Amino acid sequence: QVQLVESGGGLVQPGGSLRLSCAASGRPLSSYVMGWFRQAPGKEREFVAGIRRNGGNTYYADSMKGRFTISRDNAKNTVYLQMNSLKPEDTAVYYCAADQSVAVVAAVSEYAYWGQGTQVTVAS
């Protein structure tokens, strides 16, 4: 099975940018559809973005379109989430997740493997 480790979180001012990374080990990243999710205090975990195995198709939650970009480098076994124009409401723990199906899905329950999460705080 695959193990996932996120990094790149931190404190950023509104309007700023961060790039999150998710490093995979144990199995080739190319075997998995990958997703980014986030969970704010007191809220359910929600889908942020997803990318198919070859990186050819990407999907975003409506509130992230135009601000976030998901990408992957299968040779480096790493998935990225570039986040621009960050807002205070983007504050959350961000998780990457892996799914062995073919299509990207937004449901938390579809992803079998999860990282431990990285905290993103947007505040002035």
Image (cartoon, helix red, strand yellow):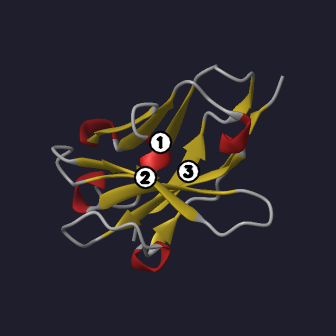
- Quarter location, residue 27: bottom left
Do the residues under discs 3 and 1 have CB atoms within 8 angstroms? no
Residue 91: x %, y % from top left = 72, 43
Label 3 vs label 1: CA separation?
Answer: 22 Å
Describe residue 68's horizontal placement relative to residue 58 as left or right. right
Q: Residue at x 28, y 61 (%)?
A: 32
Callout 3 secondary element: strand
Within 10 Å of the Cα at label 2, are there few (<14), some (14-19), or many (20+) other Cα atoms?
Answer: some
- CB atoms at circles 2 and 1 under 8 Å apart? yes
Q: What type is the residue that disc 2 sits on?
A: Ala
Placement of 84 over or under 89, stated as above or below: above
Residue 55, given in percent of the width and then of the height, sits at 21, 44
Residue type, label 3: Val
Q: Nearer the viewer, residue 71 or 74?
A: 71
Residue 105 left/right relative to 2: left
Q: Quadrant of the N terminus?
A: bottom left
Could you say which quadrant of the image residue 56 lies in? Answer: top left
Residue at the image position 66 percent from the left and 36 percent from the top: 9
Instruction: Sort mark 1 into few (<14), some (14-19) or many (20+) by Cα contacts within 10 Å.
Output: some
Residue at 39%, 77% in the rendered image: 110
Q: Quadrant of the C terminus?
A: top right
Q: Say the numbered circle drawn on residue 2.
A: none
Of all residues, the one furthest to the bottom in this rendering is 109
In the rendered image, which residue does mark 1 sit on? Answer: 64
- Tell me how far mark 3 sits from mark 2, CA to CA: 22 Å
Q: Which residue is mark 2?
A: 61
- Tag 1 secondary structure: helix
Query: Outermost residue, right direction?
Result: 124
- Residue sitting nearer the eye, 40 or 63: 63
Residue ID for mark 3:
5
